[in-house]
Amino acid sequence: MSDRAYVSTRKGLFELHREDGQWKFGPVHFLGEPVSISLPDKRDGSLYAALNLGHFGVKLHRRDPGSEVWTELAAPSYPPKPADSSDKIEWTNKLIWSLEPGGKDQPGHLWAGTLPGGLFRSRDRGDSWELVRALWDVPQRAEWMGGGYPDPGIHSISVDPRDSNKVLVAVSSGGAWRTEDGGESWTVSSTGMRADYMPPEMSENEAIQDPHRVVRSRGTPDALWCQHHNGMWRSTNGGRKWDEIREAPLSRFGFAVAVHPEDGDTAWFVPAVADQQRVPVGAALAVNRTTDGGKTFKVQRAGLPQERCYDLVYRHGLAVADDGRTLLMGSTTGGLWLSENGGDSWHTVSLNLPPIAAVCFA
């Protein structure tokens, strides 16, 4: 069972730990500073934190195992834009939106997804970074557009645990992309998704889809789940084809999805009303859980606020621990809830944290 978790917020990185059967707050790191994402690297015990300091730019820090000291690293940075480039996107790192470790056979390898849509790789624990040009240079990138931010961005990175050269990333809004050769070549991989916000003749264009979040089950790695701008999708073949989940309680709109680490048929979603009304349905917070691959869902409400609740859960605001039963959920209005029985019941950790961007278990 995981005994530590991290909550990335607009005013610091909050640490939780389990002690005597209770979850308690520990140290606060980078107090007062906006933390966009954190990564506890389970391969070696390192902890990474990405900050977005506005005028002072994007920063990245690492805390080595056994140390209380944070070391500032060189944040991923874009090369100079060629003078003759027709690209309308500014080649400047505006946000580290995702951080993921490489495979178990790749010590020190990290992946970072950024705004404006660049994927970066480090081979030395974040000391240096390289832009993955093979993805940055795909012709379809000219069709990508902002989804939640003015620029497109990579928010989901999933490494196949069977083969570290197989990686799937998701772009808002640019679809899902897959490599099988460690990033040397990429294939758009959004077949089956649908973008109702586009004209009908363009709705199935794979390169303009808006997958809000994509997650993979470690134990059944061909099983992936997607919370899309226009609904919910599932893949059972590693993302090559996506099947729409057409029936779900409350709403099929939302941002967050989490999958059971060993059981690819079990996943959790946090529904909201719609794009135009980003609040819980009926102002009552709920989580939808399926245990049969999306055929049926259970609405989970016990312990969650059911009156005058307007919390929104961002893409990285829902996480499940390695035991498959402990879940953590944080909202844009500073609510933090934890479940230790698969979401059947929740208890409130806090209702007055800063806005929460991401949660994760160590």
Image: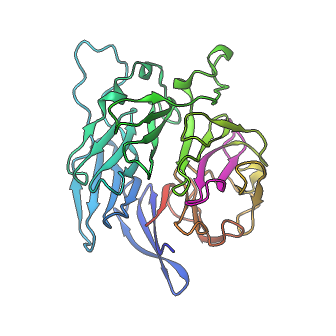
The x, y position of residue 122, in whole percent, is 26, 46
Q: Is residue 122 above or below residue 207?
A: below
Please tell me which residue is depicted at 33% across the width and 26% down the height of the picture.
Answer: 90
Point out residue 62 in the picture as x, y percentages from the top left corner: 27, 59
- Residue 3 to residue 97: above or below: below
The magenta segment:
254-279
With 321 as the anchor, is 56 left or right in this view?
left
Look at the image and say whether residue 258 sits in the magenta stretch.
yes
**How is this picture coloured?**
rainbow
Residue at figure coordinates x 68%, y 16% from the top left: 200
Who's the residue at 23% across and 18% down the image? 82
Residue 315 appearing in the image = no
Name the residue nearer the viewer: 253 or 137. Answer: 137
The image quadrant that residue 255 belongs to is: top right
Question: Which residue sits at x=71%, y=50%?
Answer: 280
x then y, percent, for residue 53: 33, 48
Q: Is residue 339 visible?
A: yes
Q: Is residue 112 left or right of residue 233?
A: left
Closer-to-camera residue (42/80): 42
How many numbered discs, if any?
A: 0
Q: Residue 3, how many percent across, how many down? A: 47, 75
The answer to whether residue 56 is above or below residue 7 is above
Q: Is residue 297 magenta?
A: no
Classify the position of the C terminus by image quarter. bottom left
